[in-house]
Image (cartoon, grey):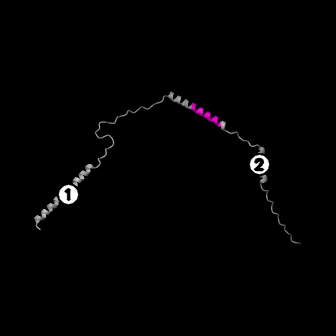
Amino acid sequence: MDISSIISDIDNQIAQLEAARAAIASINESSSATSTPVAKKRGRPAGSTNAAKTVKKSTKRVMTPEGRAAIAAAQAKRWAAKHKADKKAAKAVAPAKSVTPMKTVKAKKAAKAVTKKAPKPAPAKKAVSEPAA
């Protein structure tokens, strides 16, 4: 083989490779063009003229001593009314104490004493025989 024929073969192969590269590059470019677009970012876009509005901070609300006294008096009145109602309800609901007459207590004790077992008698001692003299 001749050097000139080798060079021409290499040039043919280079041309084929460049054509293949161009085809692949065009496929890649067309697929990126049809792919989903980049999602919008949240928030105000850069360079927007809509600046955040400054909100005036409200002043702290202060109660006058007279107002505070009026509220305290009203609350004390409510507490007193509730306390009175609770006391009245407790008095109405509370049952009367049941007192057991003394006779029934004594009768119960006597019944317990009868049902208890009588103590066992002590065992009898054996008679000891004395030696005959």
Of 7 and 58, nearer the camera is 7
**5 to the left or right of 114:** left
Of 131 and 9, nearer the camera is 9
Of 62 and 86, nearer the camera is 86
Q: Position of residue 38 (x, y in %)?
A: 29, 47
**Disc 2 target residue:** 108
Q: Amino acid at mark 1?
A: Ala
The segment highlighted magenta reads 77-90
Which residue appears farthest toward the bottom when viewing the image? 133
Tell which tag, 2 or 1, sits nearer the viewer. 1
Which image quadrant: the C terminus? bottom right
**4 to the left or right of 32:** left
Residue 49: which quarter of the image? Answer: top left
Q: Position of residue 126 (x, y in %)?
A: 83, 66
Residue 15: which quarter of the image? Answer: bottom left
What residue sits 53% from the left and 28% below the top? 70
Element class at badge 2: helix
Which image quadrant: the N terminus? bottom left
Rendered position, 57 above or below 22: above
Tag of residue 43? none
What residue sits 60% from the left and 32% below the top? 81
**109 to the left or right of 16:** right
What residue sits 58% from the left and 33% below the top? 79
Residue 7: which quarter of the image? Answer: bottom left
- Circle 2 packing at 10 Å, graded few (<14), some (14-19), many (20+), is few
Residue 86 lies in the magenta stretch: yes
Residue 96 lies in the magenta stretch: no
Which residue appears farthest toward the right when viewing the image? 133
**Disc 1 target residue:** 20
